[in-house]
Image (cartoon, grey):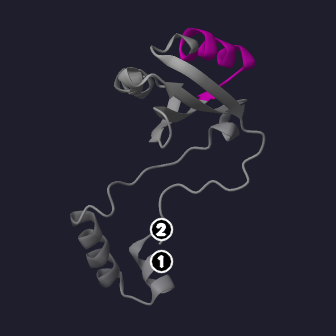
Amino acid sequence: MSYVNIGMKVNLSRVAVKTRIRSLENQGIIEKYVTIINPTKLSHTISVFFDIELEPSSVSQVIDILRNDDVFTQVYQVTGPSKLHAHAIVSTDEGLSDLLNNVIYKLPGLKKVKCDTILTRIKDIKGVRL
C-alpha cells in the first residue's frame, strides 16, 4: 500500500505518513517488511503443530535443531515443564512420517510429543494490525 493510500485512509498527507512510518522504523517498532506466501495455495501441503516436552537440560539443543531445520516455520518456548511449540509444513503424509521418525522422535531429551494437523484455517493473522 502506498503512502498516498495510507494517507487517504487515516486522513494524513503522503509526507506525514512517510515521516511517521520512518519514525516507527527508526524506533524498531516496524522491524521489516515481508511477503507472506500461503503455502496451501502453491501446492498440496500439510500444516502441522507439535507440542514437545523435553528434559530441561535438552531445551537449548532442541531449539537449535528446530531453528536450523527449514521445515519448521515457527518455534516457540512456552510455559509448562520444558515445552516447545513448533509449526512445520510438509508436502505429503510420507513427509510428515519422515519428519516424525527422523527428526522429532530423535530429539535429545524428548519426553512427550503431541502432533496436530490443521484441517481448516479459520483466522490467521501475522503480526500486529494497525
Mark 1 neighbour class, 10 Å CA radius: few under 14, some 14 to 19, many 20 or more: some
Image coords of residue 22 (percent x, y):
26, 69
User: Based on the displayed image, in which of its 4 quarters is residue 113 positioned?
Assistant: top right
Horizontally, residue 18 falls left or right of residue 106, namely left
Image coords of residue 56 (percent x, y):
40, 26
Q: Amino acid at mark 2?
A: Met
Magenta stretch contains residue 93: yes
Image coords of residue 112 (percent x, y):
59, 23
Residue range corresponding to the magenta coloring: 89-104
- Residue at 35% x, 81% y is 14
Which one is nearer the viewer's eye here, 5 or 72? 72
Q: Are marks 1 and 2 in contact (CB under 8 Å)?
A: yes
Residue 72 visible to the viewer: yes
Q: Can you identify the residue that label 1 sits on?
A: 5
Horizontally, residue 97 falls left or right of residue 28, namely right
Q: Is residue 118 above or below residue 13?
A: above
